[in-house]
Each structure stands twice: as C-alpha cells, then as structure tokens.
Image (tube, coloured by chain):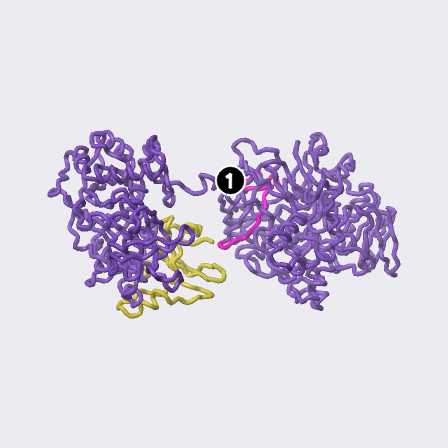
Amino acid sequence: MSRLNEGGLVDRSKPLGFTFDGRPYRGFEGDTLASALIANDVKLVGRSFKYHRPRGILTAGSEEPNALVTLRSGAWAEPNTRATTVSLYDGLEATSQNRWPSLALDVMAINQLAAPIFVAGFYYKTFMWPAKFWEKLYEPLIRRAAGLGRASMLPDPDHYDRNHAFCDLLVIGGGPAGLAAAQTAGRAGLRVIIADDDTMLGGRLLSERLEIDDMSAAAWAQGIAAELAEMPNVTVLTRTSVFGVYDGREYGAVERVQDHVARPSVGQPRQRLWKIIAKRALLAAGAIERPLVFGGNDRPGVMMASAVSTYLNRFGVIAGRRVVVFTATDSGWSTALDLIAAGVEVVAVVDSRSTRHVAADRVKAAGAEIFLEARVDDVQGRSARAVDIRTANGTIRTLAADLVAMSGGWNPSIGLGSNLGSRPVWHEPLQSFVLDRTPPGMAAIGAAAGRLSLAEALADGVSVAAAIATDAGRPSAMAVAPRCSDEATAVSPMWHVTTRQTKAFVDFQHDVTDDDIALAAREGFVSIEHLKRYTTMGMATDQGKTSQLNGHALLAAATGKTMAEAGTILSRPPYLPVAIGVFAGHHRDEHFRPVRRTASHAWAAEQGASFVDAGQWKRAQWFARPDETSWLDTVNREVTMTRNGVGICDVSTLGKIDVHGPDAGVLLDRLYINTFSTLPIGKARYGVMLREDGFVMDDGTATRFADDRFFLTTTTVNAAKVMQHIDYARQVLWPEFDVQATSVTEQWATFAVAGPQSRALLQTMLPDLDLSNEGFPFMAAAEFRWHGAAARIFRLSFSGELAFEVSVPANLGDLFIRTAFQIGAAFDLVAYGTEALGVMRVEKGHAAGNEISGQATAGDLGMGRMMSTKKDFIGRVMAQRPGLIAADRAVLVGLKPVDRAVRLRAGGHLLASDADAVAANDEGYVTSAAFSPTLGHSIALALLKRGASRHGETIRIHDPVRGGDIPVEVCHPVFLDPEGMRIRG
Amino acid sequence: MRIPCPYCGERDVQEFVYRGDAAVSRPADDKGFYAYVYLRKNVAGVMREHWYHAQGCRNWIEVARDTTTHEIFSSVIAKQTAS
C-alpha cells in the first residue's frame, strides 16, 4: 500500500471495496478510482490506442489521456471513463480497455514492432490496394486492433433529466478565482450559479499546501463553499461540467447526479443536462499542466508533477518511492518540496533552466541531486525503473527511480472561451495561448486568464465579480482579496528533448510521437489545422488537453515559425465527452416526441383498431375483426359497408382554423385561388391555396357561419404550416386587414359520417335538425347544440357518398362516437380507418398529399379553372409562368391495369407502350394506388404528361425494382360516380 | 440562440420559425414577382429577418441579426412596421 497514515481529504474511517479487472481492492471515501489504484500500487491501467503500449495514470483531473476504463458492466457499462474523475464508491467495478487477453499480456502490443507503418497519415498511405479490401478487410482489422472501450450495445437502463436555469452570473470552476468571485457576487445579491467538475469546491486549493487568511487553503475553500451553500441566491453545482458556450449567452452543463453510486436511487436521474442562460459568466477553469516530451514519457511511473502533489496532498497516497522531478517551471519545485515534506525520497530535481530555484538548498538538504540546464533523455523500464539524465555538460547520469514527476508549464483552460470562434493568441511570458476576445458576457479570471499565482486568482475573483455586481446595480461591500501564500510561477520553454533515444509521445491518447509531427511537417502539413487532422493529434476523447501545445511547438520548430505565427486551433463543444443519453433526456422510446390522440382514441383502441402515425397524431388505420386474416380483407369490408350502408371515421386531425373579422372574406380571397367573399352564410366551399411560387400548398374547405366568421380546414400534415401562412398574410402582407385567425384543431372532435344510410342515422341521433336534401343540401353547414354544447354539422364528402361531418367539442368526442354506435347498431354502422378513407378517395380521384407534392400546379390536379381571374391571390402571378402552364405538363389521370388481376403500386414511372425505359422517355409516375373493392380490381392515380387528352390510351408502368412493367389503361381520375349523384342524393 | 420577442420577452430560438429576408415586399403589380419569390442576398452581416413566434404569441416579428455572430440588434412586431 502507498497510502499515508494521515493527511488529505479522504475519510479513513470509511473504507470502500472495488474491483479492477476482477481483482478486489480497497480505498476510502473521498478517493477517485485513480487515487485508489495508486494507493493499491496499481501502475498499469490501460493500453494505448495504436501501439498498445502499457500506460499508467498521468494526471489527476479531467484532462487524463491514459487512464481510461470501462465503469460498471452489462447495460450499465460506460466505456472510456477517466479513472481520475470517477468518485470511488463501494462495489465499484472497473475494467481496463484495448487489451487482449489481459492488461499485463496484450498480444496486440506487437503493433509496436510494426510502428513504422503506424506513423502519421498511415490510413492514407497503407492498405491502399486493392480498393475493395479496404471496406471488407483492412478497416475492420484496424478498428479491432486500434481503439478504446466498447459500448455495451444494450439499451441504457438509466434516466436522464434536463433543467433550464437563469442567472446573473455563472462561475465556471470552483478554484480560488471562482470561489472568490462567487462569494463576492453572492454577497452582493446577484443570482449566481457556480459549477465545478469535482465532488467539492476548491480546485487546486484541495491539492496544494497553500494558506489563505492564515488557514489551510483547503479549509478556506470549505468555509467559502459552506457560505455559498447557505446563500439562497447562489446555486452550487458540484460534479458538474460546463461543456459548451452557445449563442445568446447560453451555457450547456452536465451534472453527474448519481454517477458516484452503483445504481441511481429510485426517482433519481443518473445525469442532468443544464441549459443555463447567464447574463455574465466567468471562466475560472484554471490551467492544465503540460507534459515534457522525452523518451519514454508515456511509461507508467511518469506523471504530471501537479498530479503527484494532488495524490499526495489530497488523497494521502504516494505515487512512487524514488522520485525524479523534471521541470521547466517553478511549480515542479513545489512538488519536490511536497514529497520531501511527506518523507518520500526525491532522487533528483532536473531543471531545464539555468537559474537556481530558491528552494534548491532545501531540496538538496533533503538528499536530492540538483541538475540545472539538464534534461531527462529517456526513461528505462516497462514501468519507470531508472532515468537517463543529460547534465549541463552533456554527460549522461542514470539514476534509479520509479516515478518521474514532470512539469512543462501551465496552459490556461481556455477551451470554452473559443467555442464561438475567437482564436486564442500567444502569450510570451506564460509560454501558452490565452483568450483574445471572449464570448459576449464572458470573461476569464485567474489561471484561465494566464494569471497563475494564488494571489492573482483571488484578486481577479474579487475585483471582476465586484465590477459585475456594480454593473448590475448591486455594489459590493467586499472588494479586498484575502491574504494568501506567495508563489513563484516562472517558466521557460522546454518543448522537446531532441537527444532522446526512445519514443517520445506528444499525444498520449492517440499515440502521436514527436517523429509523427516532424514527418507531417516534412510532408507539407504545416498548418495547425492540417497537422491535427493528418496526425490525429488532439482528436481523441481528451481532445488534446495535455498534448495540443507541445504539438504546436514541435510543428513551429519544424517549420521555423514562432509559436505566435503557428497559432492554435479553436475548440468546439463539448469540452469534455458527454453521454448522448443526457442530451436525449426523457425524449426516448415512446417519449421521443409528443403523441396526439383524437377524442375517439380510447374507443378505437377498445375496438381493436390498428393505429398509424400521421405526424404526431395516432389515427385508427383499420378496425380488424377476429375472423379477418389480412388487413386488405378488413379495409375492403370497411369500404363496402360504408358505400352500401353507413360508416364513421374520426377526421379530427385535419387542421381547423377560425378566421374572424370584417375583412375575413377578403383575406380568404387572397389565400385561396377561388373566391370566398361571396360565399353565403351557412355554406361550405372547397378551396385550394397556392404558395407564392404558384404551386399548390394545401387544400381544404372554408365555411361561413356569419358575415365576419369563417371556419377553415386544412390537411392533417399542413395544419401548422397553413396557420403560419395565414398569420403571415394578415400580419405582414396585408396588415391593413381587420381580421384575426386562431387554430381550433384540438378544440373540435370531428367525425365523417358517410354512406347512403348516413342521413337516416344522423337524423335519428339529431332529431331537432332538418337533414333532408332540401333543408340541408350538399355543402350546407349549420351550428347546433349537442348535450348543451356548441356543435357543427357540414354536408361534405370525401368518400363520394352522401356524407356529413359533425364537429363537437373535443371533450364530447368520446360520447359522440359511443352514442353513434348505440344508435348505429340498427343501421349496421361500421367504423372505418385511414386506409379505407384512402381507398375511397382514390376511387373518387381526390388529390391528397401524394399528389399535392409541392411540384404540382392547380392545373396539374385538374383544378386550373378554379383560379379566379377577378382578384389577387397568393401564387396568382407565378402560376402563370410558361413552365407552369405548358401543354405537356404531367396532369392527374386514373390508371387501370389491362390485366385486372394485377396489383398496382405507387412509385412506378410511366412510359409509352413501345418506348425504351430510359429517363428521356419518362412521362410521369404513379402517385397513389389502391385495390378498389367497389370495382373489384387495382386502381391508381398518376401524373401523366398531356394526361387529360390520353384517356383510353394504353401505356405501361415501369417498375424494375418491384416486378417489371405493367400495361395500364389511362382513364379519368374519378373512377366512381363521376356525375356526383351519390353525393347529392 | 435567444430571440427577444417584443410581445413575450426573450425566448429560446426553438420557439420560433425562421422565414428569411424581411426587406423584400410583395409587388403591387404583376412585375417583380420573380425577384420577390426567388432573389435573395446572402448577407454576411446585419440582416432584417422575419421570424414567427409559433410556440408563443404567434406574432411575425422582424429581427435585425448579424448572420456571422448571431448578435441581435432589434426586434419589432412585423405588423407595426409593414406598410
């Protein structure tokens, strides 16, 4: 065990058991999986992406590239989880990835021998020939050999929640700058949200031996956290990562609500997506320490110096017994002092700089050798065993060591700041990139702004938050930052140890080496963006948080550019990997989108209806009876019983719009191609709307109930579109019209009652109405009362039969259908679904969605003469374009198979009988087809060139995909009762 | 993105339906319809656009938006600016 007996923030009185690759281990409450593994002396945690090299834990934060594990198992398995951010819980189950058969013995490590072919751009250079081998052989092989964890392929059993929040100030990061800012703004009374990845607020204060206001920094942080928790205007979100900045001061964050337990408790989501609208935001995300590029820098036992300190100070674990610190910064020396203070043997401090650090004497007194202007060339051993140090005079000293703590400097965590497209700029003193312009409302503070010392962070937090409070009209009383430890933060660039003998890695997770960068540069990939894609540097799940800058520096060196010239890349959301499930939230399975049910839905379900989706609506498709073996039998029965007796169909899904006002009639004249201002009260009329480009948009009826009161219907799918169109017409095109419009689709339940017995049935149901042909002729409409509520009846027919449509308030719809069937038993009433409705409309040649395709004109659909020449209407001018009135346009016709036994299907193209099946001879296509039980054979509607003059001609349907050519006879599109005798009967 | 609706206040863009250029107007006579229906400038910068608050007050609004940054400069009810 490498756990110290005291120190840190773990609770040694609460031991937790966990397994890694099936072996049991123990840790403590407060551990991460990484700290617990280190405490158990587990050094080998994963295998690398391409070369399957053994890898250990590199960092102590969310930037971790190496220590990726699969957490949990079965449906709960979550691949590519960073061990450094997983809170340990009792029973935690973790498995290593990308190895076979085991982590210690991974046969794919043979890839290392083939390293020459896995260089940058190997996808483009290797496996090129023969081309067909790529898909079948090479790609599957490569994908199996190179990769990370695998998804469980099982449905996610957990729930995900979503929350929308608004605040005056969002503080991203709970380190010293963030805490000072949140406290200042919170005390000033602003609505504050502070979000941090970690399980508790504090950031680096939890990991370093610093003092604030004469107490330990960790204690100070806990004090502030407690104060924030008490403030009603402050929301503290721990375990929460802000992953993206979006337009309009929107921030996306994911809260890992129950990731730190084996199974979420009942009623709790595993994660929660936060959509935060923040007037102002402070990026206080701190900085990420960058590695040094030397031979074997990826070996287990090579760790970031800050991580070594974190494991020591926060978790009370020591990551090695004999430590070499390799640093280009002052902060590496802090790690050396931390280790010495804990009694760990520091073998040497290797500083690439020449200036002797102030702590050098103390470090030397503890027994460490000091090497200035020196570097670590190579690490020996599969896990670190010894290091080769190149001293100032060029000689090599080899020292035994099992841990190398490296510190190449600090990169401000600016990723979120470039989400909206502002490219970061080079900052010479810091040797890193910082934000130039920030997204609207956002500012960076503390280390994220390149102000690395604790004092600067605290001062930033207080002063910037105080200014924001003042802007918001809430001047803050607190404007003095707390006193704190002094820190040196100097750094000199040390990008590359060129004298190394073994592989030196830049991007650990994607196995990109210094040689790969040099090769890419030699091959001409000299732009940062090209380099990234060619070498795949920074394109793994860690998005290059530790690798990016080193790669840029190597490229700059290889191309003779300065860092400022080479520039850096932009960062897109998400900043950290986010599970797809949390974006989906509750919108999955039957909740994927809203479901709209008609008023008769429950009744239809009781009758055994099959339902079909029509947009969001569920419509009864047919009502099968137990003795019926195929849906076609059912539909044929529904059609036949309706045509011979009476049928009823719920048509409530049609769009319904009330149009009121003195100019209602004039508005309708502009919307429809035909005239409505002359429509008598108590009458309905069929109407067609065009788009302004002259093509048909929608059709339906409009009924006049008063001088200034019309009621419109639209097709089901276009209900919202027509509403929007009407609003545009009355608000934008003709704002002078005094007219209002509102959707009443959901207010009315509407039933079509069709068939020769429909009048008799309805007259029995509604004895107070006069439904005689004289009293209530075709296209008549009336308002009446039913069960004390307003109701409407129309004599409209889509089926071609004597038919009525009855509308009652939606809450009476269920009662209406049940009442109809109580009375209807005597009339042999049948319920019919959308399929029978469709058959009857094809028999009657009515255009529907298949014909109103957006490419058909009113003329194409046989309604050209409805277009008024006496008034303006939308689409009038453009409908007269030569191409839209050309003589050879495809127009609506009917088709009958020459061999009546043959089934017709929609989609086939039309050819003259003797024409070759080439596109040049195409004369149109079949739009709708149905079996007509009334006629006893298949029928179809089609759009055929010059179709109106070709009735009687025999042509053929060309359908090579589904069964070849079918000879058909062209006919009038109205197959049944073309004179309309039934409708008017 | 968020859009300030003059009637409802600032709302999420998901509540709105986009139409496009608000600068074109329907010609009074038969000439000019081709340009009205088909010709649009592809503005990189501030553009007056029509948006429909479909999930809110159902007003058509005219929004001045920078198409390169999504910054919104003004938002008025279209009926009040239309001729």
Which one is in front, A324 or A685?
A685
Quadrant placement of the N terminus of chain A: top right
Q: Which tint is chain B? A: yellow
Q: Which residues are magenta?
A: A221-248
Please rate how many residues cluster around mark 1, counting C-alpha atoms within 10 Å: few if below 14, some from 14 to 19, many from 20: many
Residue A679 place in picture, x, y as percent? 17, 52
Amino acid on which the number 1 mark rests in the picture: Asp
Which one is in front, A375 or A130?
A130
Q: Is residue A225 magenta?
A: yes
Residue lying at 36% horizontally and 42% vertically, measured from the top left: A617
Chain label for disc 1: A
Residue A605 place in picture, x, y as percent? 35, 33
- A40 lies above or below B23: above
Residue lying at 80% horizontally and 47% vertically, measured from the top left: A382
Name the side, left or right, on which A756 lies relative to A746.
Answer: left
Name the side, left or right, on which A206 lies relative to A196.
Answer: right
Which one is in front, A441 or A377?
A377
Q: Is residue A574 magenta?
A: no
Which one is in front, A251 or A834?
A834
Q: Quadrant of residue B46?
A: bottom left
Name the side, left or right, on which A566 lies relative to A386.
Answer: left
How many badges with numbers are in the image? Answer: 1
Q: Which tint is chain A? A: purple
Task: Check disc 1 and report the residue beneath it.
Answer: A161
Q: Is residue A743 visible?
A: no
Residue lying at 85% horizontally and 55% vertically, measured from the top left: A389
Residue A204 place in picture, x, y as percent? 68, 46
- A240 lies above or below A855: above
Residue A684 place in picture, x, y as percent? 19, 48
Quadrant placement of the C terminus of chain A: top left
